[in-house]
Amino acid sequence: MTDKTKYIIKIIASTITILAIIGYGIFAFVKFGNYGAQNVCNKIQVKIVDDNDYKFIQPNDIITQLNECNIYPIGKTISHKQTNQIEKCVEAMNLVKRAECYKKNNGDVVVSVYQRHPMFLVVNGNNGYYIDTERKKMPTSSKFTAWLPVVSGFVSEKFAKKDLYDFIVYINNDEFWSNHFGQIYINQKQEIELIAKNGVYNIYLGKLSNYQDKLKKLRAWYEQYPEAAWGNKYSRVDLSYEKLIYCIKKTAL
């Protein structure tokens, strides 16, 4: 093969390579050149992940929040940066614990919302708030009310988040006590009165110190003296005395 032939073959090969590159560029432009248009969001799907248990938030609330943040995605090209902005916007809502946002291949957006979970309701006069499972103050909602222990009286937020929270967790973890007590009243001395659903209505616990022993004592009283515990003779049971249960009879009308 002569040098001239080799030169011609080299020119042809280079030309084919260049044409291949140009051809792929044209293909890529046709295929992907409209990428931005393909990734314009035409639909947003909002999922309230735990809406079987709590209904504090509705999908329309999320749409309203996104509009207020000026990042409602419909008709816009969505990038990773925008999905992060959507998450932060939704997580700024008081009743939201966490939000996850991602973009589908066609550009549509999915937002998954996790609500905060309340542990108990605190009622102070006309004001009320929840303490959630992370010991944080949580606002109530006009759209949904959770069936939880209700605490009223002189309740400081600090007390609610610490000692009272531990006590209510203890109550909730015991099937008998969680079904038996519906309300808790706290007086000015931070002493506890439990409101029972059945039997003797008022159970005076006193200070929260040693509440496990006091409730064990009460459980033993229910088991050993069911006629007294579940009857109509007493109006109040006092557990504040060590190794003693003091019962107050109902006054005659």
Image (cartoon, rainbow, N blue to C red):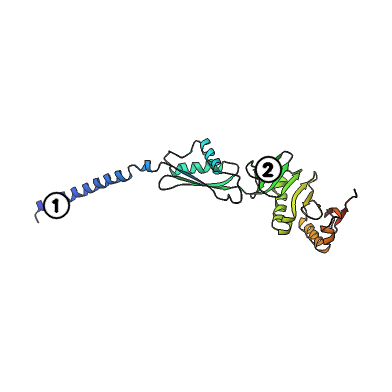
Question: What residue sits right under mark 2 in the picture?
Answer: 129
233 in relation to 101, above or below: below
> Where's residue 118, x and y in %?
65, 48
The residue positioned 70% from the left and 55% from the top of the image is 172
Q: Quadrant of the N terminus?
A: bottom left
- For discs 2 and 1, the disc positioned in front in the rendered view: 2
Q: CA distance from mark 2 to mark 1?
A: 83 Å
Residue type at numbered disc 2 = Tyr
196 in relation to 69, above or below: below
> Where's residue 98, x and y in %?
56, 47
Of pointers 2 and 1, the one earlier in the residue sequence: 1
Residue type at numbered disc 1 = Ile
Question: What residue sits right under mark 1 in the picture?
Answer: 9
> Where's residue 77, x and y in %?
41, 40
Write down the quadrant of residue 129 in the picture.
top right
Disc 1, SS = helix
- Could you classify mark 2 by the number of other residues whose Cα lies within 10 Å: few (under 14), some (14-19), or many (20 or more)? some
What's the mark number on residue 39? none
54 or 138: nearer the viewer? 54
Q: Residue furthest right?
A: 252
